[in-house]
Amino acid sequence: MTGSASSLVLDHREADAARLLLPRPAVCSSAGWRNTHLELYQQPPFATAEHRHRLHAIALGLPDGAGRCAAGDRWLDGKRQSEQRQAGDLAMIPAGVAHRCSWNREARFAVLALEPEVLQQVGQDWVDPDRIELVPRFMTGPDPLVQTIVSTLTAEVEAGGWGGQLLVDSLTTALAVHLLRHYCTTQPPRSSCAGGLSAARLGQVKDYIAAHLSHDLRLVELAAIAQVSPAYFARLFKASEGLSPRQYILKQRVEQAEVLLRHSPLSLAAIAQRVGFCDQSHLTRCFKRFTNVTPAQFRQWQ
């Protein structure tokens, strides 16, 4: 974070980005994610100095133990508005826009920051990237999809990254598409992906997944094989397979684990590593979701 006291600039790619702005550090935050950064805060009554964000920022009100949120004022792009702030209400703070806010009691909130280039990359299949502009929004209402994405990313932080980069990439892409449709000045037209990927492209992607199951597969590398943007790839792949890329990869990992459980003396921990799960617990959780039995039960019954 750089700048004078009257013009702070927050860069959420930095550790403890708001250290000069807020009295307390983040309760928890993401680490190592590309393009997306999540921070959770609990702060005493306070009023921030004016600041700007290098990334697009979404502020989401979180309830306290009694289910209440702290009310206050917000100044956004030269305008001021009082906010009552119910749980799940969100504010949209585009990169570079002047912003400050206050709250009248202990406050809990999340900040989800997104690289501006993501909107351009995701939107390039539908609109001119140079015309994409995020619209400022005061914290006056909820957005269930954004709330679900923040909740899922929070669970990913708390679980220590079980879902991997592919989960974060998928949620980031879904968020970007949602922002393009509902919070940007130029909205993409509705389009159909009924045809899905061509048989050749789909085969290349599936062969790559099969050969790299033990790796932390990323949406961007799968999209590169199909020669389309990550957002468009995710939609085309689901139209072709009936599953999202992440669901398909989990299914392939479980099926490969079944083969090893039948024909290999490897331990459950070694099998988990061999097929790309974070650890044995991650294997067990996903395996039971797909088969309704644990890996140990499956091996015992073979």
Image (tube, rainbow, N blue to C red):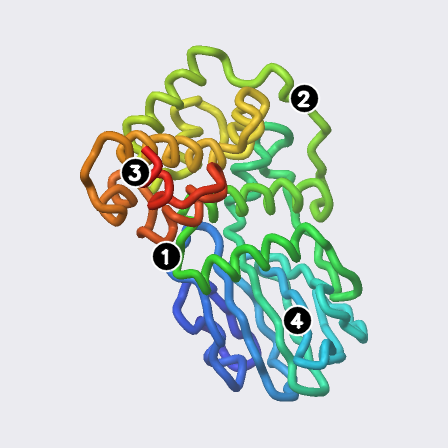
Q: Amino acid at mark 3?
A: Val
Q: Which residue is mark 2?
A: 192
Sort mark 4 into few (<14), some (14-19) or many (20+) by Cα contacts within 10 Å: many
Q: Nearer the viewer, mark 4 or mark 3?
A: 3
Q: Which residue is mark 1?
A: 32
- Asked whether, in this view, residue 122 is left or right of residue 223, the answer is right
User: 254 or 33: nearer the eye?
Assistant: 254
Q: CA distance from mark 2 to mark 4?
A: 36 Å
User: 285 or 52: nearer the eye?
Assistant: 285
Q: Considering the image in quadrants, where does the C terminus appear?
A: top left
Q: Are marks 1 and 2 in contact (CB under 8 Å)?
A: no
Q: Residue 206 placed where, x, y %? A: 39, 22
> Is 84 placed above or below 162 here?
below
Q: CA distance from mark 3 to mark 1?
A: 22 Å
Badge 1 marks a residue whose secondary structure is loop
**Label for residue 94?**
none
Q: Which residue is mark 4?
A: 62
Q: Amino acid at mark 1?
A: Gly
- Asked whether, in this view, residue 144 is left or right of residue 156, the answer is right
Q: Residue 179 placed where, x, y %? A: 66, 46
Q: Earlier in the sequence, mark 4 or mark 1?
A: 1
Q: Earlier in the sequence, mark 2 or mark 3?
A: 2
Q: Nearer the viewer, mark 2 or mark 3?
A: 3
Sort mark 2 into few (<14), some (14-19) or many (20+) by Cα contacts within 10 Å: few
Q: Which residue is mark 3?
A: 275
Q: Earlier in the sequence, mark 4 or mark 3?
A: 4
Badge 2 marks a residue whose secondary structure is loop
Q: Earlier in the sequence, mark 3 or mark 1?
A: 1
Q: Amino acid at mark 2?
A: Ser
